[in-house]
């Protein structure tokens, strides 16, 4: 990796993210004059700075988190299908967050302030991160056959755990009061909403720290991708590095799910596309995927907002990422397969 | 998917929990203080729209939900749904007051609207008493307390009238159906449950929850005398899916003409009349 190439790629990634945020700020239900908004004319100013910009920032944080986590999990499992959503990490995060919401609703029968405190953004985020970490540990522990990590087994464990988590959440929905169930349902659909600046800043800090950790670990991810024995023979402390990557990927996924629910396939599509563009070097792949993941989700959310305007509604962005992600992924897979035959 | 649609439709049209559960986390006002007599009002719930219109103040409304069907607001911009109001569209209408039926789903969006400088009046409206109180509160928020009081009194009188008419009548045992597949009924603590009691009925759906997904076999075993079909968004003949219930087989089904009985608000009077007519046809004509 030459320094100049890396700088150019990351610069372009940052530019793409900035461009996506700018475009998202320009699009919406309400016609808006940029000059009026920046000149302080209401309601244009509030719509631009109070609604569109924070929502784009939210999309960027979630997209960065999911794409970075996806890249790291793919390296760790040495399998391109690994992704927070597919591996059950998102499902674990959703389950953790839902359990905190249930606890809040039960606590409300005993002592009101406790319920208010539990139902806030931070405890739900903590629950989601814990759920994500739990799911990751489960997937990597049960994905071992005869002491060796089998990527296919881990993926299967993830798929099954996802179904199990979804079932548990369905049961939880019956247990909480109806208005809480509606909130849960909306959250799980995978939609970007309007978070307070404090929540946004706190989540951005968690995701930023996780991303920094993954970037620092990225050269060792390159070695891990060769295989555990090879990496160990090259001086990598396989167990410790893997644990650190898992913690960082879980924190990023947990924060993303707490903010936006189950937005799938971002961590699958974006690293794939970036790998095709930039090659398999994780020192470049991790930060570039993160930047483009942010851009991707911001654009997807803008599309969700604008495309369905005539219907007076908007689909959750998670539906759009899955719609775009599924077919694109299959196409990529077919292409990779053909290339393999030729070679 | 049908269950989801139903759940969302229910969420949109109906009160969701006992009053004290909703009141808990809902302050009465959010955002900056409202003007004494707001002129540009956005309503985030059909029942609140009805309340404003019933006071003769529909000309103050500048935006309503996509579920609103009152003729007075047919031409107004739609600001989204009950669970997903669009803060951007609301702000674009430059309202000086937003009326909001407290609801956990819309809370983040509504809080955002308030934070950006729009006064929001939060109204927990779940039961009959809430609907009467809401008339007064909305009147006060709009700077028309007299109109609010008048509407409140007329609703209270309608409730009293129904109670009187139903007083000497035998209690009819009713299953109040709001969805057929899955079977969703009005349970204790729900608005229709209260209306049934006022209209001389007794709800057979005993249980802890206001809107349970009800086991069909339990409905069969409870053997209601009458099934009230309030699934007004679904075709009438669909009730035959519930033919296992003896009342449905004998044709003891009264279909409500509209969703008035699911909207705690000024349609209360008409809903009580319709229910009284369904439960006690002999008394309704008196």
Image (cartoon, coloured by chain):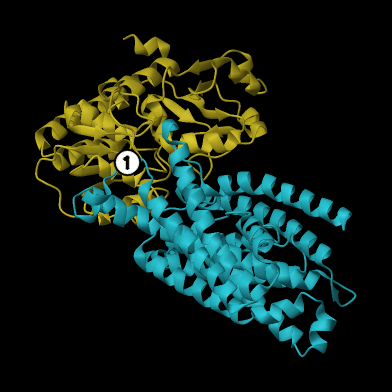
Q: Which chain letter goes with mark 1? A: A
Image point (40%, 30%), residue name: B262
Residue of label 1: A30
Of the 4 image quadrants, the one containing the N terminus of chain A is bottom right
- Residue nearest the observer in this picture, B11 or A47: A47
Image point (35%, 65%), residue name: A197
Q: Secondary structure at mark 1?
A: loop
| Left or right: residue A268 compared with residue B277 | right
Q: Is residue A111 visible?
A: no
> In the displayed structure, would residue A202 be above or below residue B251?
below
> In the displayed structure, would residue B48 be above or below residue A232?
above
> In the displayed structure, would residue A70 be above or below residue B144?
below
- Residue nearest the observer in this picture, B34 or A81: A81
On the image, the x and y values in percent for residue B204 come to: 53, 32
On the image, the x and y values in percent for residue A343 come to: 87, 58
- Residue nearest the observer in this picture, A299 or B143: A299
On the image, the x and y values in percent for residue A119 come to: 44, 63
Q: Chain B's shade in the image?
A: yellow
Q: Is residue B177 visible?
A: yes
Chain identity for the colour cyan used in the image = A
Image point (63%, 61%), residue name: A274
Outermost right residue: A146
């Amino acid at each position: 990796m030459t320094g100049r190439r890396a700088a150019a790629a990351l610069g372009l990634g940052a530019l793409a993210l900035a461009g996506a945020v700018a475009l998202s700020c320009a699009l919406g239900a309400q016609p808006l004059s940029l000059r009026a908004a920046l000149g302080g004319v209401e309601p244009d100013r509030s719509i631009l700075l109070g609604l569109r910009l924070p929502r784009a920032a939210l999309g960027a944080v979630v997209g960065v988190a999911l794409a970075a986590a996806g890249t790291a999990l793919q390296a760790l499992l040495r399998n391109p299908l690994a992704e927070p959503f597919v591996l059950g990490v998102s499902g674990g995060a959703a389950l953790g967050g839902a359990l905190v919401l249930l606890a809040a609703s039960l606590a409300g029968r005993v002592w009101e302030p406790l319920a208010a405190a539990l139902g806030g953004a931070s405890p739900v985020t903590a629950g989601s991160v814990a759920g994500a970490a739990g799911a990751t540990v489960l997937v990597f522990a049960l994905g071992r056959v005869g002491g060796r990590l089998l990527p296919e087994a881990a993926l299967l464990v993830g798929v099954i755990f996802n179904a199990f988590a979804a079932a548990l959440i369905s049961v939880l929905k019956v247990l909480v009061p109806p208005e809480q169930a509606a909130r849960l349902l909306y959250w799980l659909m995978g939609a970007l909403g309007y978070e307070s600046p404090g929540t946004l800043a706190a989540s951005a800090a968690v995701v930023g720290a996780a991303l920094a950790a993954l970037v620092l670990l990225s050269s060792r991810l390159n070695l891990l991708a060769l295989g555990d024995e090879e990496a160990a023979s090259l001086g990598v402390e396989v167990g410790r590095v893997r644990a650190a990557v898992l913690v960082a990927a879980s924190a990023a996924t947990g924060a993303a799910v707490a903010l936006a629910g189950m937005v799938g396939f971002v961590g699958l599509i974006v690293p794939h596309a970036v790998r095709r563009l930039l090659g398999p070097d994780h020192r470049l792949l991790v930060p570039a995927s993160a930047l483009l993941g942010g851009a991707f989700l911001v654009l997807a959310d803008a599309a969700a907002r604008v495309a369905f305007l005539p219907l007076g509604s908007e689909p959750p962005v998670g539906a759009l990422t899955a719609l775009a992600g599924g077919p694109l992924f299959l196409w990529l897979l077919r292409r990779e397969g053909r290339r393999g035959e030729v070679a | 998917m049908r269950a989801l649609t139903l759940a969302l439709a229910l969420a949109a049209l109906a009160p969701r929990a006992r009053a004290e559960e909703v009141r808990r986390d809902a302050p009465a006002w959010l955002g900056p203080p409202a003007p004494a007599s707001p002129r540009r009002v956005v309503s985030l719930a059909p029942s609140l729209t009805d309340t404003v219109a019933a006071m003769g103040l529909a000309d103050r409304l500048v935006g309503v939900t996509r579920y609103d069907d009152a003729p007075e607001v047919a031409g107004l911009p739609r600001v989204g749904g009950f669970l997903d109001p669009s803060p951007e569209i609301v702000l674009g209408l430059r309202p000086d007051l937003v009326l909001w039926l407290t609801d956990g789903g819309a809370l983040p969006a509504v809080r955002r609207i308030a934070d950006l400088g729009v006064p929001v009046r939060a109204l927990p409206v779940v039961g009959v008493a809430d609907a009467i109180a809401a008339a007064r509160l909305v009147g006060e928020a709009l700077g028309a307390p007299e109109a609010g009081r008048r509407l409140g009194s007329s609703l209270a009188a309608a409730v009293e009238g129904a109670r009187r008419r139903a007083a000497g009548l035998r209690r009819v045992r009713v299953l109040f159906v709001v969805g057929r597949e899955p079977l969703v009924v009005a349970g204790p603590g729900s608005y229709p449950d209260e209306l049934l009691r006022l209209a001389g009925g007794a709800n057979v759906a005993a249980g802890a929850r206001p809107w349970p997904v009800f086991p069909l076999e339990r409905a069969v075993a409870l053997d209601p005398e009458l099934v009230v079909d309030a699934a007004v968004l679904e075709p009438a003949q669909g009730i035959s899916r519930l033919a296992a219930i003896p009342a449905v087989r004998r044709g003891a089904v009264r279909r409500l003409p509209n969703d008035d009985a699911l909207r705690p608000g000024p349609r209360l009077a008409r809903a009580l009349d319709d229910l009284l007519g369904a439960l006690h046809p002999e008394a309704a004509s008196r």
